[in-house]
Amino acid sequence: MAKFYKILTVWYQENKRDLPWRAKTDPYFVWVSEIILQQTRVEQGTAYFLRFIDLFPDVNSLAIAPENEVLKVWQGLGYYSRARNMHLAARQIMNEFGGVFPDTYINIVRLKGVGNYTAAAIASIAFGLPYAAVDGNVYRVLSRVYGISTPIDSTQGKKEFSDLANQLLDQQNPGLFNEALMEFGALQCVPKNPDCLRCPFQDQCIAFARNEIAMLPVKSKQIKVKKRFFNYLVVRHEGYFYLEKREENDIWRNLFQFPLIESSKALTIAELINDEKFTTLFKGNKIAIDSFSPEVLHVLTHQKLFVRFIEITIQNPEPDHSWIRIHPNEVAEYPIPKVIDNYLLSKSLNKLSQ
Ligand code: SF4
């Protein structure tokens, strides 16, 4: 166990990246960085982290911010529930913990959106508490070095890897151990074609000895990818256009989008204008279809979205009262999904309103 820690920390001192959240062990900074880095590469996450702490430098500033502002800073990162939960957790810290970040694992894990991994990372890095943080990088390193083929997404696998990580954990320096192990997985023991010949664990790595690197770690469940077809209506009237808020329990909740007709398959323009939802929306209004975009593929972890934008000019304003009529200059105030942002960037905003 001590040997593992020694090899790991020597490697870490020589290879660790100089990342902005490592400058401090403030629990707020550790929390923000850990949440941003879930499902996000460090290169992309760093810019978001810096912008986030610039706007919300502490728990209180995050707690009092309007949700739209928090989602706007998050725009483009995806997994927006992370931002909504952080916002709620900041309010929880103000209300339940007197504005002071909780300093025990039990209280940290009670925060909205904080699971075992994030709680262990904050507890160990910010407070020096002995909890091993087991993320995807750690599963990969441990499964390979110790030749463990128990599926990492099974209850048994989660327990086995967590127990092993806690046995290996250096009790005196748990934060350093966790950061080093995650960094080792991110830089050295990477998912595909790791550079094993230059790895300090090569002598003891079971996967390397058995040539099983590509097979580990094992996952039992295949992620099912759902196909969805989004027809966005870019409805224009006298220099304005319309947005609606996504309020259902679905992707992009509380973000804003063009009015949407979702269909079970790709629709032609004729099928769309004869669709019941479409005819109901524009009943009694004179409309002109200005354009029908090619299909754009937008890939999320569990979903493939096939997206079209249909530009429509209407004669009477406010065809649906849940829509928000906005001027192109105001769109920057609204958090919007990346696929819509990309569309807006591809257009001149002035043209959009014509
Ligand atoms: S030898 Fe290869 S597979 Fe084993 S820990 Fe090192 S990089 Fe990972």
Image: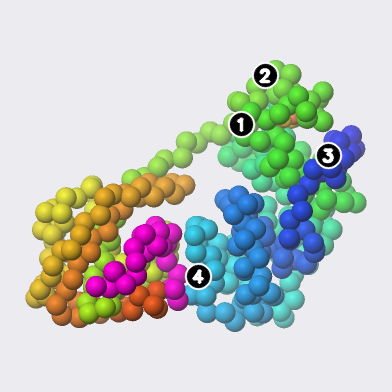
Q: How many angstroms separate mark 4 from mark 1 (CA)?
A: 34 Å
Marks 2, 1: nearer the viewer: 1
Give me the disc on residue 192.
Answer: 1
Q: Please identify the dominant SS of the magenta region.
A: helix
Residue 78 point in image, percent of width and height: 50, 57
Say what amino acid the circle numbered 3 marks: Trp
Q: How many angstroms separate mark 3 from mark 4 (CA)?
A: 38 Å
Q: Is residue 298 left or right of residue 201?
A: left
- According to the picture, the residue beneath numbered tag 4 turns out to be 72
Whether the residue carrying mark 3 lies under 8 Å from ligand 1 is answered with no
The C terminus lies in quadrant: bottom left
- Ligand 1 in which quarter: top right
Say what amino acid the circle numbered 2 marks: Asn
Q: Residues within 10 Å of mark 4 (few under 14, many from 20)?
A: some
- According to the picture, the residue beneath numbered tag 3 turns out to be 11
Which of the two labelled residues, at mark 3 and mark 1, occupies the earlier sequence position? 3
Which of the two labelled residues, at mark 2 and mark 3, occupies the earlier sequence position? 3
Q: Residues within 10 Å of mark 1 (few under 14, many from 20)?
A: few
- According to the picture, the residue beneath numbered tag 2 turns out to be 211
Q: How many angstroms separate mark 2 from mark 3 (CA)?
A: 23 Å
Q: Which residues are magenta?
A: 332-354
Q: Which residue is more in the foreground, 164 or 272?
A: 272
Which of the two labelled residues, at mark 4 and mark 1, occupies the earlier sequence position? 4
Q: Which residue is more in the foreground, 7 or 111?
A: 7
> Tag 4's secondary structure?
helix
> Tag 3's secondary structure?
helix
Residue 305 point in image, percent of width and height: 35, 50
Q: Is residue 155 left or right of residue 67?
A: right
Residue 112 point in image, percent of width and height: 60, 66
Quadrant housing residue 129: bottom right
Say what amino acid the circle numbered 1 marks: Lys
